[in-house]
């Protein structure tokens, strides 16, 4: 059986997860190397994976001829540059979202991809979640009629670490970008008007660095279809990700709160737990998107999530942030 | 529009509920009189219903020519005698379950009914619950194939008052009799073998009066079909009534725990309340069974629950109690 | 016991429901008269309630000295005038929402109320729903911290009859007004900015009369708190009313889809029904709000929902409609 | 880091799953060899795992000095013999349930274990399921009082392949043995009386080989506590595994039907899928029990599930089968 020799660039939470999956769980994958500029991240990784080369500089991965593909999970603000370098080094690329923070760089990404391997995918892992994939399949079957309205809720239970938040691009680019992608995926067609309201409802420390903890986003599509997205850091009860798609003959509701299939009952009532955070909720999705990446590259299939998907989501996120600033709708 | 003039015998919790329903909520009914041997019960009732005659002796109701129908909700051990008196007085009769505690009296009931008004029904109110009625309808439609197994759970959240328990006939006759009726209703056909295990798991005071707080009941039908019934006073979390019917092409699950459509969420998880007790859960069923009673008598339709249903349930309850005593199955 | 003698003006679906409740279910109430300009509505009512006077002209109710209180459930565009007439005739008044469609009339209502009986309440019946009332109580207890964000969904399963829709005031005034009231009730404080997007996603016939079938509404409060409201006629699966209130220490989720506590299972999966329409979902709420009305008037308590609540909701609805027209936020 | 070198004996569905887990997912494990008498099973395995030695005869695994531990997942009727051989060869042993079908062999297992490695565990994987483990933890915390009643439901959606059923030991030994173990685990203490009713409700082909497709099992404990277990092949809607434990201050309900967090809604209602079969439901549990096995052996900790647990379950299963045959309770 053919094997895809892989490298992982960046060993933060997601990079570590991708490396683990490529090392032991993904059929057809072989993890050869990882890199991270931080000593602590490299040491933490080395302890568990003795057979994998660990570099400080990602260029050492790109130089290796025996490496076919790389996963880019570095700091958000380095994504664009590392992806371009990787493509130029002849690698197939999986890049964590967002693909870039800069629309000018988006143009360079397009150009580089056209001139190189042609394989680039973006980590919109929710598309690979069982529930999202199943919901999409049911809608695509046509049995529910046309999808005309999407409602997405994404709520984190906590303020992110302030150091992380500073480089994350803010609530919209860091978190809502998943829902922006879902709104595009489920409804389809161009979005013509964007409005957003938001602010700091709970975490004043976010306000101090210019970020917010809540946003409501309205999308009007050219076709007249609509979407509403909520992003929040304020769900003190747990991690809460849900999407509802209204179709002309029915609807699909995706997501739920419960983590463990166990109910504890006493005089106060019936108590269930709630999903605590994203790695628990989407553990399987991260595995599935790596499977898809490895299998697409090995079989020379086009990527399931394209560069254009990645760029469109970033452009919409920028419009949302502009609307928040202007307190006015933004026409696209 | 024709009106059915009604009397209610017995003003305990259920008698009071039936009187309220007949007085203000049941189309076609008019409540003329009630009776109860206890002063407190009569006074409590008089306060709210000034237009209704209140008697100490139920015979005063039976004597009235202008009363067409009576609801018997007196102490369990008086049911049989009062029903016979009522039928002989020419009344149509609704009797709370169990219809009798005595198989000899069952014979006299049969004879009296045959010689008199011909209308008698028994308060198996669960058959009138929306969820039970809907489940039965879906099974009767045939879409799910033949019903081959029924599983019934009935759990009370508390020990009943000991004075009530003493005259209630015990756990099986007081509580499980509803599930015994449901097992007959859903599966159909004769039951050939009964086994039960049970005892006192929580409320020692019940043990002292010869009652139990938990029973598991197994029914083998002549057809080979099966049922299992659990009755309990030990659900400290609330009132818990559920039935599952397995059919050859599917199944129906009836009942649930939640009372209020409200979820309270905090760091401990997701909390919903639980139905507290039977009058809350089956409020509407009591109204529906009165509607059915009044409408059946006015329209000269046969009763939805028959004397034979009432007697069969009592006979099965007796077999359960015998099995508990012998610690052996009882063949019927 | 004191009795409140009542009249009902308007015998549409809601007027009929209120009349039924006052006639047989509400302790302390006596229904003496009803009125409706339509022969069919009067005849339909007369068949069931022989003891109640039925008039064509509501003035015949107002003239009667023996009538203490009236329920106004006439066509939306007549609410304001009939309420003013009723107050001037010395009646205590319950008025269906919206209390008026006209901000000038709102001023006259204020003036009239100040000069007359002083008792006026508006039919925001959701406040009387068990689940909403329970959720509010839990929030008011303080255990969940401060409420900072409300998310309301109201979806009807069908296009309303076009003749009804023409006089209803449109989606926002007819339907979203409930959620506008809830957003005020749960979050509190003034709203400073309103934005809305909406249109026709499904029912072109609504577009032809200038109405819409979907709206997304954003509220920014002066305090910085936020709310989002969705109103829709497009839930082909049933009647779907839910509210989520995010608090600084937890959250409350109110509402749900299931009508009957019965699950039907087969090879396709697990199927439950969905609430079909509003009278089924809120049957008990309509009863409770009448109980509250009757009991408040009899006991000379202030109304639970005030004229100012009614006017504030109408003013916000007008701002929503203005934003829809301008495709811009509206500052208040 | 220390590594446990493992072999897997038997490459049926479970053996294959264990081999996969040991090869790529279990920290500290290394899979060196597998065996199966069937060519097809060996070939199927070889295709995916080129680095693992594949034998026809399990003795070839036992002979290898470099193998520390074996997983026995061969045909049920060979478990006892292979476990004894493995222990004698100095291996630590994980054996699939049931550990034996023969109480005489149980004695030899006890003796051999005492004389050899001392490490043997049995595959009661439900104890490693998140929901079961969480429920047990909450009960063990004492917050819910003493566990006094357990109710277990295990329903398969289909008749097993008849060739498999013939060697499976029948419904009770093959399937209910999990619930027998859970009843012991949750309630504790000796069981004094067993009764069972059962038969063929759906699959006549099972009757022809002397098996049944439904059983109800009653356990009376010496302490007076009780349990009821249902085992069935008749859940046409899916794989349905649930346990309820009633405690003196509350309860724990474990398990549920839904597989995918997606609801499809249309005019027929609200539809969710159902877990299709055991490997989907308990995928993670199989991984967790291997982790526990590998980690216990490496760290010289006693096994979480003991030989005595394995033997007690088999002895109870035998009593159930005896009761079914005699149609009488069996005293232990």
Image (cartoon, coloured by chain):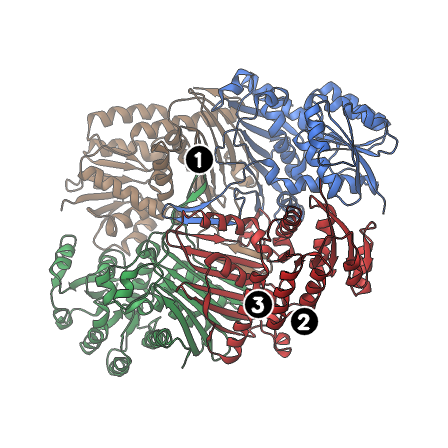
Chain colours: A blue, B green, C brown, D red
- Looking at the image, is A221 positioned above or below residue B56? above
Which circle marks residue B85 in the picture? none
Classify D51 as above or below A53: below
Mark 1 belongs to which subunit?
Answer: C
Task: Give how far across and how far down residue B90 sits, in percent.
Answer: 20, 76
Circle 2 residue? D167
Q: Secondary structure at mark 3?
A: helix
Asked if badges 2 and 3 are on one and the same chain, I answer: yes
Residue D66 or residue B257, whichever sits in front: D66
Task: Identify the residue under disc 3.
Answer: D314
Q: Position of residue D25 (x, y in %)?
A: 70, 45
How far apart are the alpha carbons under marks 1 and 3?
A: 48 Å
Circle on res. C251 = 1
Q: Disc 2 sits on a residue from what chain?
A: D
Q: CA distance from mark 2 to mark 1?
A: 53 Å
> How many numbered circles does the render carry?
3
CB atoms of marks 2 and 3 within 8 Å: no
- Which of discs 1 and 3 lies nearer the camera? The answer is 3
Q: Residues within 10 Å of mark 2 (few under 14, many from 20)?
A: few
Task: Depth check: give the residue in front, A99 or D20.
Answer: D20
Which quarter of the image is occupied by the C terminus of chain B?
A: bottom left
Local packing at callout 1 (Cα closer than 10 Å; few below 14, some 14-19, many 20+) is many
Q: Give the mark nearer the N terminus: 2 vs 3.
A: 2
User: Residue C23, image x and y in percent?
Assistant: 24, 50
Q: Is residue B272 visible?
A: yes
Q: Residue at x 48, y 21 (%)?
A: C330
D246 and A242: which is toward the camera:
D246
Q: Residues within 10 Å of mark 3 (few under 14, many from 20)?
A: many
Q: Is residue D89 left or right of residue B160?
A: right
The x, y position of residue A1, in whole percent, is 85, 47
């Amino acid at each position: 059986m053919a094997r895809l020799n892989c490298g992982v660039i960046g060993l933060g939470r997601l990079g570590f997860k991708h490396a683990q999956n490529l090392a032991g769980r993904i059929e057809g994958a072989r993890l050869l190397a990882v890199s991270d500029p931080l000593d602590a991240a490299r040491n933490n990784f080395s302890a568990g994976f003795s057979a994998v080369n660990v570099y400080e500089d990602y260029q050492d991965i790109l130089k290796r001829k025996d490496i076919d593909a790389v996963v880019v999970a570095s700091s958000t603000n380095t994504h664009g540059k590392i992806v371009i370098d990787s493509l130029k080094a002849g690698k197939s690329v999986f890049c964590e979202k967002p693909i870039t923070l800069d629309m000018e760089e988006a143009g360079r990404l397009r150009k580089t991809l056209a001139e190189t391997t042609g394989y680039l995918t973006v980590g919109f892992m929710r598309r690979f979640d069982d529930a999202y994939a199943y919901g999409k399949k049911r809608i695509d079957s046509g049995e529910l009629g046309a999808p005309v309205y999407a409602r997405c809720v994404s709520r984190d239970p906590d303020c992110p670490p302030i150091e992380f938040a500073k480089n994350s691009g803010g609530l919209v680019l860091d978190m809502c970008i998943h829902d922006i992608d879902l709104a595009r995926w489920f409804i389809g067609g161009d979005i013509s008007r964007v409005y957003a309201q938001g602010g700091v409802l709970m975490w004043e420390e976010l306000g101090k660095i210019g970020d917010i903890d809540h946003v409501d986003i309205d999308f009007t599509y050219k076709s007249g279809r609509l979407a509403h997205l909520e992003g929040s850091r304020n769900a003190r009860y747990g991690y809460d990700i849900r999407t509802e798609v209204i179709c002309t003959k029915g609807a699909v509701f995706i997501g739920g709160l419960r983590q463990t299939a166990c109910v504890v009952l006493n005089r106060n009532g019936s108590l269930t737990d709630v999903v605590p955070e994203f790695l628990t909720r989407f553990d399987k999705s991260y595995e599935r998107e790596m499977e898809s990446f490895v299998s697409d590259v090995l079989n020379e299939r086009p990527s399931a999530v394209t560069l254009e998907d990645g760029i469109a989501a970033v452009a919409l996120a920028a419009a949302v942030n502009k609307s928040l600033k202007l307190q006015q709708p933004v026409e696209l």
